[in-house]
Amino acid sequence: MMRRLLPVRSVVSCMSAVTPTTAFPCIPHAALITRRRHAADFVPERQLLFDNDSFLSGSSAMYIDELYQQWKKDPASVDASWAELFSRKDLGSYDQALLSTPIRVLPTESSDEAVVKQSLADCGRLTRMIHSFEDRGHLMAQTDPLNYMDIDVTERTPSRRYKEMVRLDLAYFGFTDKDVDRVVRVGFQNQIGGVYDTSSPPMTIRQLHELLTARYCGRIGFELMHLTDGDAKRYIRSQIELTDDSSVLHRPMPKEEKLRIWDTVASAVFFEDFFKRKYSTQKRFGCDGAETMVVGLRSLLERSSELGVQSINLGMAHRGRLNVLCNVIGKPFEVILKEFVGVTGQELLPFQIQSDVKYHLGCHAQLKLHSGKVMRTEMLFNPSHLEAVNPFVQGYTRAMQVALGEKSREMVLPIEIHGDAAFAGQGVAFETMCISEVGEQDTGGTVHVVCNNQIGFTTDPKSSRSSAYCTDLGRVYNCPILHVNGDYPEEVVRVFEFAAEYRARFHKSVVIDLVCYRRFGHNENDDPSITQPLMYERVRAMPDVFRRYSDALIAQGVVTLQQTTQKAIDEKARYGSYQDAAAQVNYAEYLKKSIPDKWKSMKYSDELGNVTQEPTAITQEAVSKILRALKTYPAGFQLHPKLKAVLDRRNETIEMGEGIEWGTAEALAFGSLLLEGHQVRITGEDVERGTFSQRHAVVHDQRQERSYVPLAHISDTQGKMIINNSPLSEYGMLGYAAGYSLYDPTSVVIWEAQYGDFANGATIVFDQFLSAGESKWNQQQSCIVTLPHGYDGKGAEHSSGRLERFLQMSGEDVTTPAYSKEERAHRINWEITYPSTPAQYFHLLRRHQKRNFRKALIIFFSKQYLRAPNVSRLEELTSGEFQSVILDPSVPASQARRLVMCTGQIYHYLNKYRETKGVKDVALVRVEELSPFPVAEVQQLLAEYKTAELMWAQEEPKNMGSWAHVEPRIEEYTKGERELRYAGRSITAAPSTGYKSKHDKEQEFVCEMVFQ
């Protein structure tokens, strides 16, 4: 059956998309290959879809050959365009435009068909070889300083089994000794990068193999073939495969640079040596075996500075942290030494903090670089929880970038240093990489450095991951991954400089796998040979990197043996000379100077007498401006009809001055803060609309794909309004928001949980940062967290924000005296509130910004009472303030049989029940602020209702909610002479029932207990 024949141009167009990834190029007839002396200059008419595409491959070539054979039998049987092509003596002008393939053997004067067939076979083999090196060369790279896989009979490293499946020798690709000296030219397209580029010179097959082996299987391994960005892939390939020295990865290093690297190596090595000798019993989690991390980071800063970076923010765990603090960030060595010698409680007393272990502390400095430029450097504080600081780095960086303006992503660089086991195992690493490249959270690319010491405490890699590498997470987010042997400082410098250039060029993240080892145990007093005997037999035989690099420089004639000996003596003496300086360090003064510039206007614990709070009420003029913005939309903007009715009604309540619902009060609070110049930023899952349709801060045009934020358009001089839905992440997103809030105390930064129980997934952020950050690090926390809370019969999870957990972390004793409102707020570690009205919420948000200090603010709010009948009057916003306790004017103290205290949503249930039953002798008092506890207000309340029975009512079970927090305080205030009775659900494991009928009965029972 005769096949339908396509004209030449149709076939060329169709075939240009065929890739030889699985089928090697194989063109079976001499007519299709001619002597193409100028083929290297040809750029295909149609851009190839893939970097090594060829339309003359596989079935396509067979199809053309079939046409050719058919034409030879009967020229009239093929399309006229094919007949014209095949009739040309040497294919003439069509040979370049039609038959250019990515790889071809350079022509000889012979036109023998056997030679041509050999060329075609070489074409397929060469394509396969180049692709194999690009795709799998990293598995054969010499990146392990221990060469441990060579004896790894136990397969402790997952990459071993992948490595065993890889062959890259010439014989594997079908080349024999007689083939390897044939000259080939593999370049076929301009600006495609690497050996495929037309700029690639002719070379023998042997030379090509040697080039690929040197580039992909040396002391740097490259993973790039997973990248979906063609430009990025081409750029990286060009940098790797360039045959000259123009690439940062292969540039020659002058003597002066080698000496600078040598100096940095010495500083890092003898830093650890000093503490090993002088403070051998103290934990320091040194980077012994990974000292080139310091070298790499310094080169990263130097090159980044040349590319426009002015500030870096770095987050890392304990491994090597002290060394990086000193030799990269710029923390004074005498201060670190002081922390080893010991900081006394008397020195911490002015700030009333507990402080933290030295390898958790942070620092910011102005670092002078070799170029003479000064770079702002900062390492963020972090706890022992690995990777927990990652989202803080991203949020903090983004806050700086927003403050700096449009090109800010180029000016501020986030750096994250990970451990190999942690990067592969901790979910927050995954969350953070997602967050940091999404929408408004994008920080323009992060340099991720994995300090890969090939062990996690005592756990082998085979037990800490299933993937080949600890860095495989980077593949998910399209990061190029560079594996480098940590025992070779110059290679480390090249990789870190490349990372700086890639990030500057593409504004995307890059991952560096610094393959090293841990010379000692997890801490310096551990004996790792108990669990890894063979590994540590090798480690003990390893000279330190200073000795190795010195030997290399001696061999190159850069330094002498005498110079290296003297260098070691000088470095030991330099670090030892700081003993006297450390003794003179005034640590309280150091803490004072360590407060960031933007926070110096805030009052810390050493200035308790100077705390103030401005009024929180707003003017009618401000209300009018906000209302005007809320009613104004772009021309032609069509709201959803249902939403338009809601928003129109909301605006009417403002105009009428009554019926202000929760969302309206929030909009007025945000708007007023914006008018005062504050930036307002709120993130979380579905915050634009609000989980319960209460916000609608972002509205959407129903006719075209556009949205609008009315609060962003109040005035030309207002603060920046940022609101965006976040990825479905709690741990990462709360960390990001909390990190963002640390940069500037004038910014209002809110993270809202979709439901209160979603905060469970972010427990580490609450425990380690928001509740304890000031006590550990003298770092005031400014983040606001809003948590929907309250029982409605819809199950255990979405009912409770776990109020009891937050109260348990409140750093306030039951004997705390009745300080003033401002002082008690300043003394507490964080504020925990449960406002019951829109007006209370309004004043709470504004109060947070109207003080000259900051505390993390946790706001629980009812899902059920976001709308009428729970409304406020406008005059409650234009006057008044937040009330920690709301009294009950309907029941005078003289007529009260019982005083019932409660917090939050249950008040509305109880009040409705009281009205229904006509009860006149039970007073309902709302405690709106639980931490700090309103001591003075409650003591006065107890004195007024001195004859009434006392009761605490709550929705939550007795082992949850506020009972355990409130009961001992009331006992303390009454000296045990008045009993506080409990009204609420009995002790249970789960917060609530999932059946509405059961919930209603329980709620009825609580009400009966209160009013019986």
Image: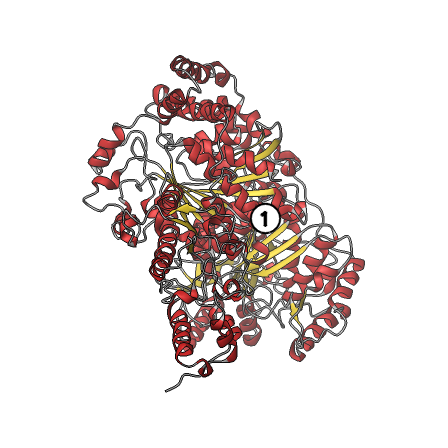
Image colouring = secondary structure
Residue 768: image quadrant is: top left
Give the residue at x 44% y 29%.
323
Residue 841: % across, % down:
62, 59
Q: Residue furthest left?
A: 153
Residue 698: % across, % down:
64, 66
Give the residue at x 35% y 51%.
136
Where is mark 1, residue-wise? 398
Establish if 15 lies above or below 319: below
Give the residue at x 71% y 46%.
614
Front position in the image: 832 or 714: 714
Front position in the image: 788 or 98: 98
Residue 482: image quadrant is: top left
Q: Secondary structure at mark 1?
A: helix
Examine the rendering and report whether any part of residue 933 can be seen.
Answer: no
Examine the rendering and report whether any part of residue 623 can be seen.
Answer: yes
Give the residue at x 38% y 65%.
27
Q: Is 615 on the left-hand or right-hand side of 605?
A: right
